[in-house]
Amino acid sequence: MREDDFREEHEYGPSRSAQRREALAVLDLARRLVEQPEAVLARISMDEDLRELVRSSRKVTAQIARKRQVQYLAKHLRRLDEEALAAIRGALEHDKAEHLREARALHAIERWRDRLMEEGDAALSELLSRFPQADRQHLRQLARNAHQERLKNKPPHAYRELFRELRDLLESPSPAE
């Protein structure tokens, strides 16, 4: 009896709720595609007609018309096979992960800059233990100048220069690798 119920359920295909969830997922994918910058859109492999539809959806500014245009884009996306949708989703997730990685790297640089300004030589010693190729004297001078700029409310020239130096240092391959 249970096997018959199981077989009958699968003969009818997915339930209405499952179809609705899938349609909402594709609608969300359409929204995400429209929100992506052109550079990201260029990296995603998709049909040129679909790419043009995404571009035209971006041009619509009226809220209701834009919603309708995104739904139209979702309709076209639902016509694609599951592999193509998975490829588009994967490309968007990869881009999101790359963006998060870059943001984490920038936050790490900012933390080092703030530590160098606040803690001084203690933070500099720790930085030099991780990156022995760094120029101790130059970094110390930039940190002191940046700290003085902050105290005197001057424009942040050394503050920015310290950030650039730290970025170059942290992005360069370390000798331990």
Image (spheres, rainbow, N blue to C red):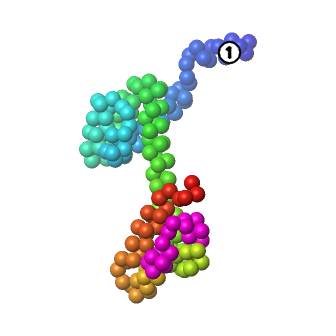
- Residue 140 is a magenta residue: yes
x and y percent of residue 139 in the render? 47, 75
Q: Residue furthest right?
A: 1
x and y percent of residue 132 in the render? 55, 67
Image quarter where the N terminus lies is: top right
Residue at 38% in and 37% down: 44
The residue segment tinted magenta is 126-143
x and y percent of residue 166 in the render? 46, 67
x and y percent of residue 47 in the render? 33, 29
Image quarter where the C terminus lies is: bottom right
Residue 174 in view, yes or no: yes
How many numbered marks does the figure carry? 1
- Residue 97 is a magenta residue: no
As drawn, is 33 to the left or to the right of 119? left
Q: Which residue matches tag 1?
A: 5
Of residues 106 and 22, the one drawn nearer to the viewer in this rendering: 106
| Mark 1 crowd level (few <14, some 14–19, many ≥20, 10 Å Cα) | few
Query: What amino acid type should be assigned to the residue bearing mark 1?
Result: Asp
Residue 17 versus residue 54 in the image, above or below? above
Residue at 47% in and 62% down: 106
Residue at 48% in and 42% down: 93
Q: Residue furthest bottom?
A: 152
Examine the residues drawn in magenta and state their main secondary structure: helix
Which image quadrant for residue 28?
Answer: top left
Of residues 41 and 148, the one drawn nearer to the viewer in this rendering: 148
Please, what secondary structure does the residue beneath circle 1 have?
helix
Residue 104 in view, yes or no: no
Of residues 125 and 176, the one drawn nearer to the viewer in this rendering: 176
